[in-house]
Amino acid sequence: MNYFGSNIKLLRNRKKRTQNEVATELEIKRTTVNALENSISQPTVLHLQSFSKYFGIAIDTLINIDLNQLSESQFTELKNGFDVFIRGSKLRVIATTVDKNNNDNIEFVSERAKAGYVTSFSDPEYIGNLPVFQLPFLSKEKKYRAFIISGDSMLPIPSGSVVIGEYIQNFFDIKNGAGYIIVTRDEGIVFKIVENYISQSRSLLLSSLNASFQPYKLAISEVKEAWKFVCYLNTEIPEPETDIQKVLQKVSTLENKINKLGTL
């Protein structure tokens, strides 16, 4: 059953907003809001994305969970970022493409495509237009995607590298100390070393390999997708570190560890 209409009506009322106010903020017609709330019309992908961002609740939850049945404590947890779909389910379907043998492709999200990916990662048409390739040494039983990275935060992995990640269905499966490509609501696509604090504080701690960048917390409600780092591709040979660079790196790493303890 689709609960989208009743859910957005409930959330609007809890937020104490009129249909006019919601329509203005989402830049749609009031009659559209009314039609969606009363299930007169079905939401488009753009509607789903807009209402999900506006209320801070996963699209899967808006469609498949009857929010009217939640207790007040459950509703509070939901609004605080503890979305039931953090765990993933068979209802969270990833848009993908396959080759002529029905094997999953590895879709490539280029620098130009990154901005669009944040809002269209679940759109089959958008995903279907991405370049694709295969790597024979990766498991055919898992789903992979490739992203280009920019900046120096993950040195010695250089800017311009293509990092390949394995799709993570259940955010609780994120392993401490491993690398992940995280697709976020507001920060775009980031590649970081992750510490999992979902159970303790509904958040992830993101750190860079380059110790000159400080770790920071990211609320789990801001995470749209997580891809576990598998490998990276680059045509450049990295330059060797000097002895003084190694010493400075160790000092910065110790400082970051101390700072990290202070954030927990």
Image (cartoon, rainbow, N blue to C red):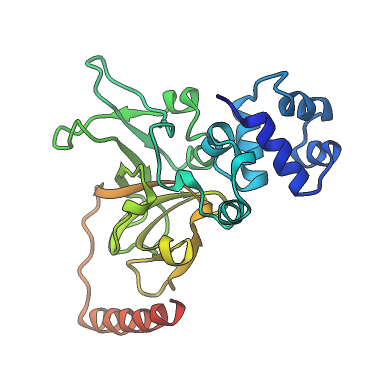
Q: Quadrant of residue 156?
A: bottom left
Kindly identify the residue that appears in the image at 31 percent across and 83 percent down: 254
Q: Quadrant of residue 146?
A: top left
* Residue ranking furthest to the left: 137
Count of numbered marks = 0
Q: Position of residue 259 (x, y in %)?
A: 41, 81
Assign the N terminus to one quadrant of the image: top right
Kindly identify the residue that appears in the image at 49 percent across and 39 percent down: 112
Q: Quadrant of residue 89?
A: top left
Q: Position of residue 72 (x, y in %)?
A: 63, 53
* Residue ranking furthest to the top: 100
Q: In the depicted view, which residue is nearer to us: 203 or 95?
A: 203
Kindly identify the residue that appears in the image at 48 percent across and 42 percent down: 114
Is 219 situated left or right of 42 in this image? left
Is 158 situated left or right of 25 in this image? left
Q: Position of residue 101 (x, y in %)?
A: 22, 16
Q: In the depicted view, which residue is nearer to us: 208 or 243?
A: 208
252 above or below 75? below
147 above or below 32? below
159 above or below 112? below
